[in-house]
Amino acid sequence: MAYKIYMELTAKPSNLEDWKWDETDEPRGTQQNGHADWKTHVGGYAWTATISGSVFEYYSESDATTKLNELNTSSSTSYGGRRFKIIEA
């Protein structure tokens, strides 16, 4: 099994609330109008596996997590505050 690290193409704008950007399930509507349905809101709409000209792919989840942590640590300076995630391929 392979694990790839993906990066957001665009960082979350600072004036946007986290819940509007993050991947969450949230109730929409109110009990008063009868539309209290669960909707899935997916933030970080575009992700790429190419980061600084490289594709980070690992066969060990722990190796991928180590690289993910390294990228997250340098994200504010090197990657403009973008987030990263691991996808099992």
Image (spheres, grey):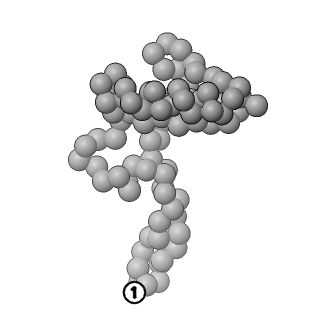
Position of 7 relative to 35 (above/below): above
Kindly identify the residue that appears in the image at 30 percent across and 25 percent down. Answer: 77
Furthest toward the right, the residue is: 1
Horizontal side of residue 21 vs 89, given as left or right: left
Using the image as rendered, state which of residue 61 and residue 83 is in the foreground: 61
Q: Quadrant of the N terminus?
A: top right
In the image, 75 versus 42, the foreground residue is 75
Would you place residue 49 above or below residue 22 in this image? above
Q: How many numbered discs?
A: 1
Quick one: quadrant of the C terminus? top right
Task: Name the residue located 69 percent from the left edge and 29 percent from the top edge.
Answer: 60
Q: Secondary structure at mark 1?
A: loop
Could you tell whether 64 is left or right of 46 in the image? Answer: right
Q: Position of residue 63 (x, y in %)?
A: 61, 27
Q: Is residue 58 left or right of residue 71?
A: right
Q: From this viewpoint, is residue 67 visible? A: yes
Q: Quadrant of residue 9?
A: top left
> Given the image, on which type of amino acid does mark 1 rest?
Gln
Q: Residue furthest top?
A: 53
**Are there few (<14), some (14-19), or many (20+) residues within 10 Å of tag 1?**
few
**In the image, residue 82 lies at what x, y percent?**
38, 33
Above or below for 23 versus 71: below
Residue that sits furthest to the bottom in the current view: 32
Residue 8 visible within the image? no
Residue visible at 57% across and 33% down in the picture: 65
Q: Residue at x 53, y 14 (%)?
A: 54
Q: Is residue 71 left or right of residue 80?
A: right
Q: Position of residue 84 (x, y in %)?
A: 48, 34
Instruction: Please give the residue where the numbered disc 1 appears in the rendered image.
Output: 32
